[in-house]
Image (cartoon, grey):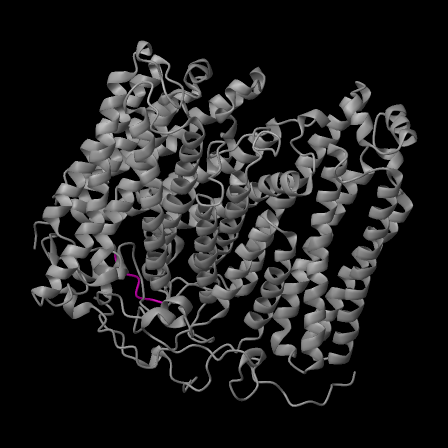
Amino acid sequence: MTDVAEQTIEEAHDDDHGDHHDDDHGHHSSLGLSNMKLAMWLFLGSECLLFGALISSYLILKTRFITELLAGNPDVIAGIDNPGLVQEFIAEGSVEPLWDIPFTSLSSFILLMSSLCMVLAHKATEERDYKNQRIWLATTAILGSTFIGGQIYEFSTFFEEGLTFNGSIFGSAFYTLTGFHGVHVTGGIIMLMSLLFLSLRGKLQSDRAETVELVGLYWHFVDVVWVLIFTIVYLIP
Amino acid sequence: MAIIEEPLALPSGDEGIASNPLGVFSRPREATGLKDWLTTVDHKKIGIMYGMAAMFFLLIGGAAALAIRVQLATPNSNFLSADQYNRIFTMHGTVMVFLVVMPIGAAFANFLMPLQVGARDVAFPRINAFSFWVFFFGGVMLNTSWFLGGGANGGWFNYAPNNGIVYSPSTGIDFWNVGLLIAGIGSLTGAINLITTVINMRAPGMSLMKMPVFVWMTLVTQFLLLFAIPVLTVAQVLLLMDRVFDANFFNVQQGSDPLLWQHLFWIFGHPEVYLMILPAFGIISEVIPTFARKPIFGYPFMVFSGIAIGFLGWGVWAHHMFVSGLGPLSVAAFSFATMFIAVPTGVKILNWIATLWGGKLTLNTAMLFSIGLVIQFTIGGLSGVSHAIAPSDTQQTDTYYIVAHFHYVLFGGALFGFMAGFYFWWPKAFGYKMSEKMGLWNFWLMVIGFNLTFGPMHILGLQGMPRRMQTYDEAMGFTFWNFIATIGSFILAVGTLLVLVNALVSHRRWKAEGRPDVGPDPWDGRTIEWSIQSPAPEHNFDIDPEVSVLDDWWHRKYAEDEDGRVRRVAQAEDLAQPGNGEGVHLPAPSYWPILLAFSLPIIGYGLIYSLWLTLPGGFLLVAAMYGWSLEPADDLDIPHDHGHGHDDHEPVGAGA
């Protein structure tokens, strides 16, 4: 068979094939990172685009909202159920009068502290310290729930002040963005509770530290997103 | 610190005995029959199901296309009412993009990629099954809108504010919205799964630059999906909020900017067109070297141009929106980017031609379809790069010129590439070759039909015939070319159907003649999927293949002799793995993927008809998630000996 057209033959590398050991049910990892962890990072990468698109939409719609308010669009003015608030918005040229920065700062702080507890839960799992593992898992979940409680309180306050979901583009965008984040936190809390339940059944031992780490990755991501949302939505004028 | 005194769990985290998860199901055992297909986690079966589902949807989308062509065949036609016409062209586009081209790409990625990287399965077999079922249920739900008040009617991109409840009060757009949201979940989980597989589960020795081009293109495609799908999801969630919960995202009266939808849609939409074509590029990059009997020309350029397309694809979306008044700076930037993305695409075309150049060509059906792709995609690419010239694009926007352009890249490009892939890998999937004679009919009818249908649309577009026009007057001068296009479309339909006929007839003939399976390597292939038996055994590889060079399988068969000439040194039959799965541990099938997937359309119908229905759907969702998570990793009844791995086997054909 010499009729093969030009074909480069590379020397086969005959070294270091024996180094690959299959330690886990015949799966080896080319990257050295477990499949689950890689998948979680990929998922979080995808989530970045989800929140990126939501935050961009919020920024565009908030700007449009202020522009239309200042231009005196009657439909937009009527969209806020509180003439006093509208006047404040127009006077300030922004939606800042609505925010209660100290309160939201506190709930942000609580959420960030929950990340610390999550780290401690993971550390305790690795150290086979299952008592502290449960304590920190529970604390993380409780702090997360406190944050959600704060968000519910904040939503109901804003609603009473006249910002409804379907009254204005600003309301729709604000509640959807922060609501999406809240749903993510709630999902995280459910995962934490499930971990706690597994731990109480004795099924979350140090060999499963990675499961805790994965939930931790998700939890930290959700916290980081909140840092962005808090900065972009509440702090930057 | 006190350590809780409890019996240690097994390393897998299971109780000692396989328990029924939540006391509901034990893991299914069937290896054949309906139940097997419903519960399988085998990437090859899932790939085949993707392909079959896509073919089913192709019949729907194709019927819609023919209805459009019949309506446009003659001037002032009343075959379809304007409303029916709107729904049919919208559903045609949506079905073809989301339920035909994308899933065929997924079919190849699922079936082929694990075989090409030397893996037993994908990284997460159950998630793989879930991805398929979610796509399938989402697609079926979208298509039930035909019977429930008619399909969506705003074009496949459903621009705001026309997609709002005020202008589109029927439920068609809700089905479009929710159906695609659901299918998008499947694309996302599929992307995560396949990327993990490529990155983490390659055979020993297969470094990234030794991966087949198809695997590279799959990787780029899945990254595009990973980042594009969430943007579409956001756009559709905002629309869902508007339509179902009365929000104001696209409410112009409240000061919203409908361009928000266009931006979100096309930020998704342009990567989308590349993720439709790149799998086909990958396929012909395997077919052409095999039948030119040469290695792919400029492999690194092939890889990096694919990656470059993946990156640049994110910076060109606004060329869909030049007429929306973006301002000169944006138009200039996006024009420039659009011209720039033609460069890596041109590199690929050059590389295929250079691979063909001087090769010993075998012009069989797979090869012809590949060459068809190269030529027709070049035509589509040339009309595409003309959109970079904004003034010209302004003239062409919303004319048949655009319709001609994207059919040349997506039908003449992507679908021709998939056809090449069907003919090429059919033996690996099913153990028999499709008839070459009928394949030639298949190819030539498709080429003739395709160019008759879409070639004239360039002329119609330049004459000014608007896209989405229900009918036209004879005085407009569109009659002749429209009639030609309609004739072409029927030839094209017959040609396309021939692939299904060929598959069935060839199978019957193969069986009637009592011929054996084609053997591991019917085409004298280059990559390691040809080193296993055909059809591929359930466990893929008896032992982990070891890869030392690009086109490793070819190099095991051929080597240089003393004179420096390339000679065959071994027969494929001797080198191939015999297909002995003894000692191989495979993931068990599971009920949970299909159950979890099934909960989503229930919630979807709930969003459209009655929010109460979301309750049982949500309950099923949560229950299935827990059932899934708590399902034992494996059926422990099956002996599962840890110490005995495939490393114990003597490698077959190693060192050739």
Q: Relative to the observer, which residue lies in front, B567 or B80?
A: B80
Q: A51 left or right of B446? A: right
Q: Is residue B407 above or below residue B333?
A: below
The quadrant of the picture occupied by the N terminus of chain B is: bottom right
Left or right of residue A146, residue B169 in this image: left
Quarter assignment of residue B466: top left
Q: Residue at x 83, y 59 (%)?
A: A146
Of residue A173 and residue B163, the one placed in the foreground of this image is B163
Q: Position of residue B129 (x, y in %)?
A: 44, 63
Res. A175 image quadrant: top right
Residue drawn at x 56%, y 29% as measured from the top left: B162
Q: Is residue B244 above or below residue A146?
A: above
The stretch in magenta equals A11-15
Residue at 12 percent across and 49 percent down: it is B436
**In the drawing, does residue B452 fall left or right of residue A110?**
left
Task: Please tell me which residue lies in front, B198 or B13.
Answer: B13
- As for residue B107 lying within the magenta part, the answer is no
Any part of residue B363 in sight: no
